[in-house]
Image (cartoon, rainbow, N blue to C red):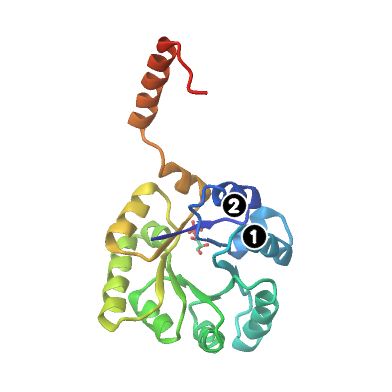
Amino acid sequence: MKFFVDTADTAEIRELAATGLLDGVTTNPTLIHKSGRKFLEVVEEICGLVDGPVSAEVVAMDHETMMKEAEVLRKIADNVCIKVPLTIDGLKTCKALTSDGTQVNVTLCFSANQALLAAKAGATFISPFVGRHDDNGFDGLALIEDIRQIYDNYAFGTEILAASLRHPIHVLDCAKIGADVITAPPAVIKMLSKHVLTDKGLEAFEADWAKTGQTIL
Ligand code: E4P
């Protein structure tokens, strides 16, 4: 399973990239706003920090303008992945871009039928929003299960990029279901390494080692 981080904070990306565990980055207009930085500039910096796909989202609503925006974005770096919304214009843009080899992430997916359309449009990634689905009284993980089943039924190559994950159990369940990729905020990714018994065990080892009076170096 690939791990993407969902942020436009380059300090956080740099820190996670240094672990060697990061496979890509997702951004969206809200995260760009939060960064307080210029969109094209921050995307360029992120593309230099990771080798994997960096999702940069178009903001136009119509196909023609989406194509023009995608043209600007894909020139930034080879690892830019164009993010388009799950609308008819977004799907049309996805089809056009993937046909000439550009990576496309279809975002704001909230139903399995939408995911089916994205796969037919040749999407590289489909982004079902688990947390926002849950927030609205739906079952976000059931959505991931449905998409997995449909994509397997027809051997679609589109990767399921489980998005809007809020906590480590979301990540665990996505891994059990077989999502191809997860994207989560830096804090959630860091939380995956935490366990109270790991901390407790380390404390005990540290104390007992000190009692031996030895050093390794
Ligand atoms: C995915 O690409 C989105 O940027 C993201 O996961 C949205 O998450 P949120 O619902 O926590 O804003």
Mark 1 is surrounded, within 10 Å at the Cα level, by few (under 14), some (14 to 19) or many (20 or more) other residues, namely many
- At x 45%, y 84%, the residue is 122
Asked if residue 141 lies left or right of residue 82, the reply is left
Q: Which residue is mark 1?
A: 46
Residue under the point 31% across and 64% down: 178
The quadrant in which residue 140 appears is bottom left
- Residue at 62%, 75% (x, y): give it: 58
Q: Position of residue 151 (x, y in %)?
A: 31, 77
Disc 2 element: helix
Q: Position of residue 52 (x, y in %)?
A: 54, 65
Residue 126 in the figure: left or right of residue 169: right
Q: Secondary structure at mark 1?
A: helix
Residue kind at label 2, given as amino acid type: Ile
Residue pointed to by mark 2: 13
Ligand 1 lies under 8 Å from the Cβ of mark 1: no
Q: Amino acid at mark 1?
A: Ile
Q: Residues within 10 Å of mark 2 (few under 14, many from 20)?
A: many
Q: Pick whichever, 92 or 42, lies toward us.
A: 42
Which of the marked residues, 2 or 1, is nearer the chain's N terminus?
Answer: 2
Q: Are marks 2 and 1 in contact (CB under 8 Å)?
A: yes
> How many numbered marks appear?
2
**Residue 159 point in image, percent of width and height:** 40, 72
